[in-house]
């Protein structure tokens, strides 16, 4: 189930606060400058559906967000637990990094764990199907898809070329929970 845990950035073993209430998650993240929304499909979708069908099911929200955020392209990425490169793909974003582009993800299916470091706190968001998270450009964060990843997500970009990770070199992520 979707969940937000708030930590002091110095202690990854003891959350200060925790909630599974979507409105409270959205409010808390909004105060930190982070967008969180729950979207509903206009028709049923499955993780294996093709990209066009998935985008079509969420078209109203995708179009609205593109207008609001100035995003120009949208695609769908999906990963299954038997992907041969799952360990490397998981490793890629496990350490703290930033992007010069917003990282906007809508989970069509499956789950993923985002941790955002903002003003001395870490906001750990367990995203499940139906969740939209927008990590603003420049925000320190890390992402864990778990040892057996399973998700399909819509991604929005201003320019996909801008979405490269710039690693901070800070080992903070190692002190915080992983997705098991
Ligand atoms: Fe990222």
Image: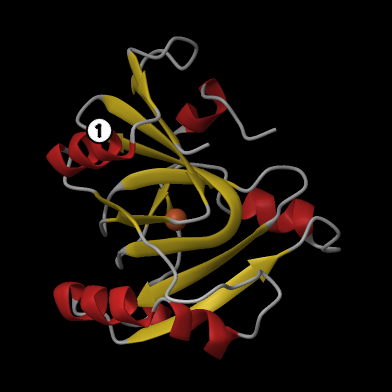
Picture residue at 77% right of the left edge, 57% below the top: 86
Q: Which quadrant of the figure has residue 155? A: bottom left
> Would you place residue 145 above or below residue 159 in this image?
above
Picture residue at 34% right of the left edge, 44% below the top: 140
Where is mark 1, residue-wise? 24
Name the side, left or right, on which 5 lies relative to 50: left
Q: Which secondary structure lies at badge 1?
A: helix
Picture residue at 25% right of the left edge, 39% below the top: 23
Q: Which quadrant of the figure has residue 125? A: top left
- Give the tally of numbered discs: 1
Q: Which sits in the foreground, 133 or 158?
A: 133
Give x and y (percent) for residue 116: 36, 39
Q: How crowded is mark 1: few (under 14 residues within 10 Å), some or many (20 or more)?
A: few
Q: Which sits in the foreground, 47 or 80?
A: 47
Q: Does the residue labelled 1 lie within 8 Å of ligand 1?
A: no
Give x and y (percent) for residue 123: 34, 32
The C terminus: image quadrant = top right
The answer to whether residue 10 is seen in the rendering is: yes
> Would you place residue 30 above or below residue 24 in this image?
below
The answer to whether residue 9 is seen in the rendering is: no
Name the side, left or right, on which 173 lies relative to 78: left
> Would you place residue 107 above or below residue 118 in this image?
below
Picture residue at 34% right of the left edge, 82% below the top: 159
Q: Quadrant of ligand 1?
A: bottom left
Residue furthest to the front in view is 43
Q: Which sits in the foreground, 98 or 65?
A: 65
Give x and y (percent) for residue 93: 55, 51
Q: Which quadrant of the figure has residue 158? A: bottom left
Describe the colour scheme in one phrase: secondary structure
Give x and y (percent) for residue 28: 21, 34
Q: Which sits in the foreground, 130 or 123?
A: 130
């Amino acid at each position: 189930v979707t969940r937000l845990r708030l930590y002091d950035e110095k202690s990854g073993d003891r959350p200060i606060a925790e909630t599974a209430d979507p409105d409270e998650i959205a409010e808390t993240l909004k105060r930190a400058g982070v967008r969180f929304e729950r979207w509903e499909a206009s028709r049923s979708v499955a993780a294996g559906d093709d990209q066009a069908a998935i985008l079509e099911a969420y078209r109203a929200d995708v179009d609205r967000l593109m207008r609001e955020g100035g995003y120009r392209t949208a695609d769908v990425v999906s990963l299954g637990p038997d992907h041969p490169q799952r360990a490397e793909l998981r490793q890629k974003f496990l350490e703290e990094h930033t992007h010069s582009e917003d990282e906007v993800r809508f989970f069509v299916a499956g789950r993923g764990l985002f941790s955002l470091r903002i003003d001395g706190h870490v906001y750990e968001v367990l995203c499940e199907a139906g969740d939209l998270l927008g990590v603003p450009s420049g925000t320190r964060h890390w992402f864990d898809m778990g040892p057996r990843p399973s998700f399909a997500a819509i991604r929005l970009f201003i320019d996909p070329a801008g979405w490269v990770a710039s690693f901070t070199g800070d080992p903070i992520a190692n002190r915080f929970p992983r997705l098991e």
